[in-house]
Image (spheres, grey):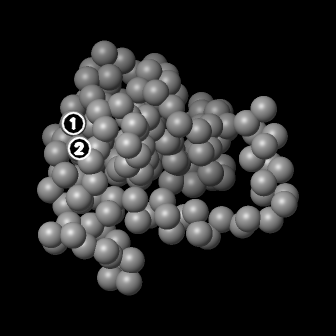
C-alpha cells in the first residue's frame, strides 16, 4: 500500500470510528484528534523479521505519547508495507482533543496480505465497558471509561511521578 493510500485509509477509518462511537457513547468528540500507538506486544518474538524488530523498538519509544496523523503514517508505513491489522478505538474524549488508540500487529505486510476488508488494515471498534463500569445516559456510555480505569491502575508512587517528570523534560 503506498503512503498516500495509507494516509487516506487512516483518515477514512478515523471518520468511521467517530460515526460509530457517536452511536454508542454520549461524549462530544472533538475533530482535533491524536493517536496512541500500541503494538500487540512490546517484546521481541521469534516470528518477527529484522525490520519488524527495529520498527517495534521505534514504536516502543513512543509508548504513551500522543502523535499526529503524519507521525502515525511515518511510524506505521514502511516500504509500502503496513501492519497486518490495526484495531482503532477512541480512548479518550477531552473538550479540545479526541485520543485514538491504534492497537497494531507487529507484522508488516503488503496490501494483498492485509486482514480487514473495508478500509484495510484498520478495524474500527468501540470498547464496551463491563457492567460495573457502565454509567449510561440515554442508553449510551462514557467513552472515557477505559482511560479512567487505566489511570486508577497506574502506580502513584514517587518513582512513577519522577519518571513522568523526567519524560516531560
Q: Please tell me whether mark 2 sits on a helix, a strand or a loop.
A: helix
Q: Which mark is residue 18?
A: 2
Residue 126: x, y in percent? 28, 58
Relative depth, front residue between 129 and 118 = 129
User: Residue under circle 1?
Assistant: 15
Q: Please tell me whether mark 1 sits on a helix, a strand or a loop.
A: helix
Residue 123: x, y in percent? 28, 48
Relative height, residue 145 to residue 109 (above, below): below
Question: Residue 41 falls in which quadrant of the image?
Answer: bottom right
Relative depth, front residue between 55 and 17 = 17
Residue 149 left/right relative to 153? left
Dot 2 alpha-carbon crowd within 10 angstroms: few under 14, some 14 to 19, many 20 or more: many
Q: Separation of disc 1 and disc 2 at Cα?
A: 5 Å
Pick the quarter of the image with the C terminus. top right
The structure residue drawn at horizontal position 39% and vertical position 21%, both measured from the top left corner, is 80
Q: Which mark is residue 121?
A: none
Amino acid at each position: 500500500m503506498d503512503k498516500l493510500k495509507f494516509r487516506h485509509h487512516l483518515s477514512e477509518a478515523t471518520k468511521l470510528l467517530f460515526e460509530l462511537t457517536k452511536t454508542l457513547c454520549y461524549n462530544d468528540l472533538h475533530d482535533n484528534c491524536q493517536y496512541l500507538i500500541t503494538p500487540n506486544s512490546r517484546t521481541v518474538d521469534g516470528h518477527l523479521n529484522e525490520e519488524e524488530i527495529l520498527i517495534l523498538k521505534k514504536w516502543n519509544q513512543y509508548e504513551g505519547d500522543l502523535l499526529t496523523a503524519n507521525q502515525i503514517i511515518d511510524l506505521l508505513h514502511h516500504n509500502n508495507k503496513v501492519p497486518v491489522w490495526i484495531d482503532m478505538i477512541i480512548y479518550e474524549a477531552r473538550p479540545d482533543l479526541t485520543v485514538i488508540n491504534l492497537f497494531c500487529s507487529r507484522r508488516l505486510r503488503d496490501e494483498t496480505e492485509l486482514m480487514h476488508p473495508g478500509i484495510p488494515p484498520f478495524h474500527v471498534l468501540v470498547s464496551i465497558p463491563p457492567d460495573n463500569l457502565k454509567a449510561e445516559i440515554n442508553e449510551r456510555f462514557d467513552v472515557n471509561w477505559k482511560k479512567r480505569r487505566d489511570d486508577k491502575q497506574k502506580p502513584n508512587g514517587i518513582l512513577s511521578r519522577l519518571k513522568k517528570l523526567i519524560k516531560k523534560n
